[in-house]
Amino acid sequence: MIETRWNADFIATILGVVFVAVGLLGFIPNPLVSDVGYFQVNAAHNFVHLITGALLLLSPYVGLPVLAIRALAIVYSAVAVMGFIAPDVASLDGAIAMNHADHWLHAVLAVVLLAIGFTKPMERSVTTAHM
């Protein structure tokens, strides 16, 4: 049986694109991700998504995709727990708009990111590992 390894560069890039897309989508009125959407966001929340996405997109180029994925997993775990037990702390006293759907999404993302970052061996791609 051949062991499949996660390619950290690819995963970080895909996650980065998703975070940037969600960050941009939050600025456009829509029923899913907006100030009145199912997932409540505001400009600060959108900028968090954009910055997170940019860091993930840059991480393969500076040789840190595995660290970026694992750090994001830890941060989302903390945000998810805080969202349920101390939502004011998680939202920085309302500076970052969040609702109950956001807390559940953060929890699911935390579980997925922890699984990706810590349970499977990850390696850098050969093409960017020696830049």
Image (cartoon, helix red, strand yellow):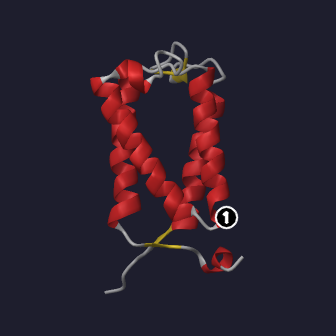
Is the residue 29 above or below the residue 112 in the image? above
Inspect this view and state whether residue 20 appears. no
Q: Identify the residue at the far right of this view.
A: 131
Q: Is residue 112 left or right of residue 69?
A: left
Q: What is the quadrant of the N terminus in the image?
A: bottom left
Counting other residues with Cα less than 10 Å from the Cα at mark 1, is it few (<14), some (14-19), or many (20 or more)? Answer: few
Question: Residue 83 placed where, x, y %?
Answer: 35, 27
Q: Return the residue nearer the eye: 98 or 4.
A: 98
Question: Residue 25 placed where, x, y %?
Answer: 62, 29
Is the residue 30 above or below the residue 75 in the image? above
- Label 1 sits on residue: 62
Q: Identify the residue at the far left of this view.
A: 85
Residue drawn at (64%, 40%) of the image = 51
Q: Quadrant of residue 91?
A: top left
Q: Is residue 33 left or right of residue 130?
A: left
Residue type at mark 1 is Val
Question: Residue 61 placed where, x, y %?
Answer: 69, 64
